[in-house]
Amino acid sequence: MLRVAASRAKQAAKVLPQLTRGFASEAEGAKSGGGFGKILVLAGAGAGLYFAKEQGLLDGFLGMPPSTSKVPTNADYDNVRKAVADLLESNPEYDDGSYGPVLVRLAWHTSGTYDKATGTGGSNGATMRFNPESNWGANAGLAVARDLLEPVKAKHPWISYSDLWTLAGAVAIEEMGGPSIPWRPGRSDKDTDHVALPDGRLPDGDKGAAHVRDIFYRMGFNDQEIVALCGAHALGRCHADRSGWVNPWTRAPTTFSNMYYTELTQNKWKKEEVEWTSPV
């Protein structure tokens, strides 16, 4: 620890003269006993110390762990994208051989809590990390996706969970043949002392059109946009321990397509009354 502190002291010693030089040069024009010149020197030294502290150069002296703050570059985000893409087909035993659909579901469910009228909810905060949201029935099974991304978060600690989850969903869509998603960073994570959202903001699969409209209208979507978003059911499958139903929605559950609506419009369907019990 002493070696680390000494190393940081050397770094600070190199930085401080550069930062104070400009201030000191102005002070040189003042008389050696002039108060104004001394003030300028002190101001320069103070600015230098502040900069050194913000850069973590004084952490060893202050007894703090080294700063992990980082200004990410496009290359950093590209590395996260690649790490996510490498995970998608890392387990051929999971569902249909891809984690892509469950990552899309994670991005959607962390975003789908948004309430346009109150400005609450949404992906910013990544509040699904905490109870009660993590245990909502609508979020059953999403621990798989959250846990899958933990190694990526550990390797790239500078990225927030909020950004990681939404970026992972965008990468998954692109890797499954979908369009390029205009994703932007900047979300931050909330702590355990946040105000929990009320349950019921996400769609319930056993309810009808009125319920779907109520859920999506709250987020600010119109009917046309609702139809487009529901088409994401082309991806993935149902699970008995999550929704209570089983099997994939389409014949190509890991390919981005309009097959969900093709199945609905080109097949003959017969309505049947079945007894359904929620698994959660």
Image (spheres, helix red, strand yellow):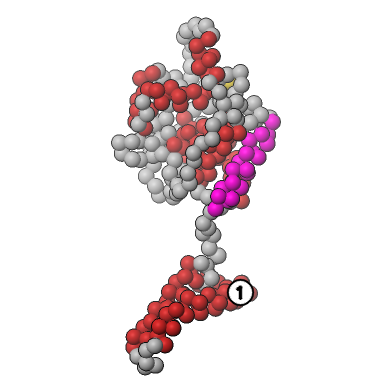
Q: Residue at x 35, y 40 (%)?
A: 120
Task: Verify whether residue 29 appears in magenta.
Answer: no
Q: Residue at x 53, y 63 (%)?
A: 67
The relative height of residue 230 versus residue 132 in the rendered view (above or below) is above
Q: Indicate the quadrant containing the N terminus: top left, top right, bottom left or bottom right.
A: bottom right
Q: For the residue carrying disc 1, how many other residues have a C-alpha within 10 Å: few (<14), some (14-19), or many (20+)?
A: some
Residue that numbered label 1 is attached to = 7
Q: Which residues are magenta?
A: 73-92
Q: Amino acid at mark 1?
A: Ser
Residue 261, x across and y down, in percent: 50, 17
Residue 216, x across and y down, in percent: 38, 28
Q: Residue at x 40, y 83 (%)?
A: 26
Q: Nearer the viewer, residue 216 or 64?
A: 216
Residue 210, x across and y down, in percent: 35, 20
The relative height of residue 211 versus residue 14 in the rendered view (above or below) is above
Q: Nearer the viewer, residue 76 or 98?
A: 76
Q: Main secondary structure of the magenta part?
A: helix
Could you tell whether 44 is left or right of 260 in the image?
left
Residue 34, x across and y down, in percent: 35, 90
Q: Count numbered badges in the picture.
A: 1
Q: Nearer the viewer, residue 209 or 280?
A: 209
Task: Verify whether residue 89 appears in magenta.
Answer: yes
Residue 124 seen in this snapshot: yes
